[in-house]
Image (cartoon, rainbow, N blue to C red):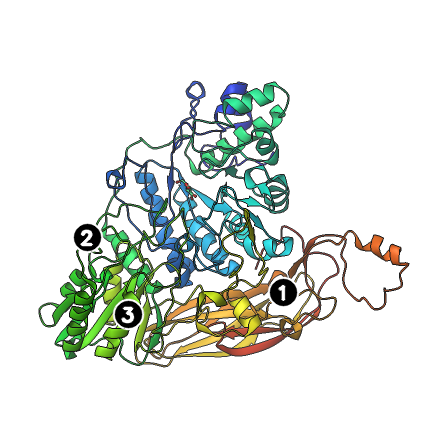
Amino acid sequence: MTWHTTGGTGRDLAALVASMTLDEKASLSAGTDTWHTAAVPRLGVPAVKMTDGPNGARGATGADHLSLTTSVCIPSASALGATWDPAMVAQASGAVARQAREKSARVLLAPTVNLHRHPLWGRNFEAFSEDPFLTGRLAAAYIRAVQAEGVVATVKHLVCNETEHERRMCSSEVDERTLRELYLLPFEMAVKEAGVLAVMTSYNRLNGRYLADDARLLSDVLRGEWGFEGLVMTDWWALASTVDAAVAGLDIEMPGPGRAFGPALADAVRRGEVDESRLDDIAGRILGVFERVGALDDPGDGTEAPSDNEEDRAMARRVAAESMVLLANDGLLPLEPSSLSSIALIGPAAHRLALMGGGSARVRPHYSLSLAEALAARLGGSVRLLVEPGCALAGDASEAGAALDDEGALARAVEAARSADVAVVVVGTNDFWESESYDRTSMDLPGAQAELVRRVTAANPATVVVLNTGAPVSLPFAGQARALLQCWFGGLELAHALVDVLVGDAEPGGRLPVTLPVRVEHTPAFGNFPAEASEVRYGEGQLVGYRWYQARHLPVSFPFGHGLSYTTMRVGPVRASTGRLDEGGSLSLEVEVENTGARPGSEVVQVYVAPPGGGVASPGRPFRATRALKGFAKVRLAPGERTTVRIELNERSFAYYDVADTEWPELLERLGGVDRDRSPSFHRSESGWYVDPGTYQVEVGRSCEDIVARVGVEVVGRTGPIPRNAPVG
Ligand code: BGC
């Protein structure tokens, strides 16, 4: 048995489980209502409360959104992804976990680690990145900080939940290598790097099988290969089977009362369809996880008394600024308030910024502040502020989007822009356009916003365009705007943080965690999104995100990893601790970074690995992406300051997942071996992570397209697979 018995009081869980009746054990396997697990009062086992994340601890849902208790609302995950900073992510998720405790919850339903496979997935804002390594590293930091506060983190949704379209029915059709290298990798890192205590299965099916019933994934991979000791729960109302799910390794059906688990599971055990030892295992795992965070002794008093404090406000403001990506700037930013007499603040978001996306991630923030208010407060009375929405965020039910005559509103905005020294136009989406339960149908900005940007930039060339979205939108004006800033769904301090960045009180510290494509037709999953006949074909295979654009030499609006700064940095030289990687070895890369400008700033050193042959498949070798992210580090430097960044790589940084070809010996025999010499492929008999020998390029870049240095590494390789419990990188 591999239950968690450490932490908490060290009570004897095996004895506790042994003292339970069959019905008591089974009662633990289902919730009792939307958010609580079952109590066993006779034995002092309390009910434990769960709450959604990821960008806040929502608390128990009331009749409507406004009856929720308020929350700190941190920037959404795509913004966190843009920080490229595990420490910053940890600060943010730690605050969410403390708020979960204040709402008497000991389980947080976060983080979401599905990938940005297609820009129109409704929940992209809730996920970190298109890259699995960046996702996994940041998720691990998120999880560690949550669990350090005595809250169980729940990594979700296992796995390949990258569309909302018919999400409870669709089957994601994915080959094993892609599954391992892309979609499972963040889950593997959450288990191995962060010791995540809970996993949520997704609504969708994977290759025809519901995830809650998938024994290979839940038992063989998650527990067997990765050593996961926590509990597995369903997504809400996702469970339909009793025996298959129990045997597969599922532990809790949510929400309650149980339909397939709970009493139904007790009956299945009585009928002999599920062994009672599995029920012991379920009870032991659940109790072990709760014991581990101290929830058996202190489940909370059931109240929701969230605090709105200065520390959280300052954190949310810092993280939001650190996530903003300066896409383009010809010197217009930062604005110098003392040299300005007027600013035109334009766009539907000027009155109401989008702080988060819609669906289960939606929280009720402690407060909200408009950009106009924040800007006015910063500028005092010295700069005249002309505020014009310009157009409605069509589909927005809020007052910001109601009451606008299109041509008149556009004309007033253009006039304001023309008469001001500088125009700031904020365009984007909101929690109506980007939400759980449905995907977007277009990458275009809703309503007349693109036209608004076109007219405003024409009226006043000194225009800053700000993108308030959780995911990529079309940027027909990318070449026109003198300054273009992606501010994401930046949480409850977004207005202050945006002002900080606009006037240079803070550096725009973000780098793109996703490629911004030129058009949706260029995107990897175009043609395979969302689904056909209940199947989502992951036909692009491993070529997700930048891997696709690079392999196909497709132009992009802005590449993965890109982001400008208000200062200048020198990156390099680069030294590797060794030029040769032996079996079981590792190497560390030292990269010098110097702030050569006049302002404090940050740099994200990105390390990519390029396989021998530049990724073009040679006969018999597996196809490899041109380059893939395998390490990164963010540094902040004062003007003139210099530092050395260290990034570690190991065998997994150079490896790929090879699926056993068990039919090969038979095929050879059938041909009598005639083709043997002309077929130099590897046909392995054991699936696993393999490293081929050869000279790999370790590339240091400031984006996936801006590589500033390369170091050749001779990789010795190995014949067998890398041990399954080896760390990812
Ligand atoms: C979402 C989960 C969420 C759950 C509980 C589901 O609809 O997919 O992410 O945690 O609801 O609100």
Residue situated furthest right in the rendering:
672
**Residue at the disc numbered 1:** 654
Residues tagged 2 and 1 counted as in contact (Cβ below 8 A):
no
Residue situated furthest left in the rendering:
381
Q: At 42% across and 35% down in the image, what residue appears?
A: 294
The mark that comes first in sequence, 2 or 1, is 2
In front of the other: label 3 or label 1? Answer: 3
The C terminus lies in quadrant: bottom right
Residue 683 or residue 509, whichever sits in front: 683
Q: Amino acid at mark 3?
A: Glu
User: Disc 2 to disc 1, how far (Cα)?
Assistant: 53 Å
Q: At 53% across and 23% down in the image, what residue appears?
A: 264
Q: Quadrant of residue 584?
A: bottom right
**Residue at the disc numbered 3:** 451
The mark that comes first in sequence, 2 or 3, is 2
User: Disc 2 to disc 3, how far (Cα)?
Assistant: 21 Å
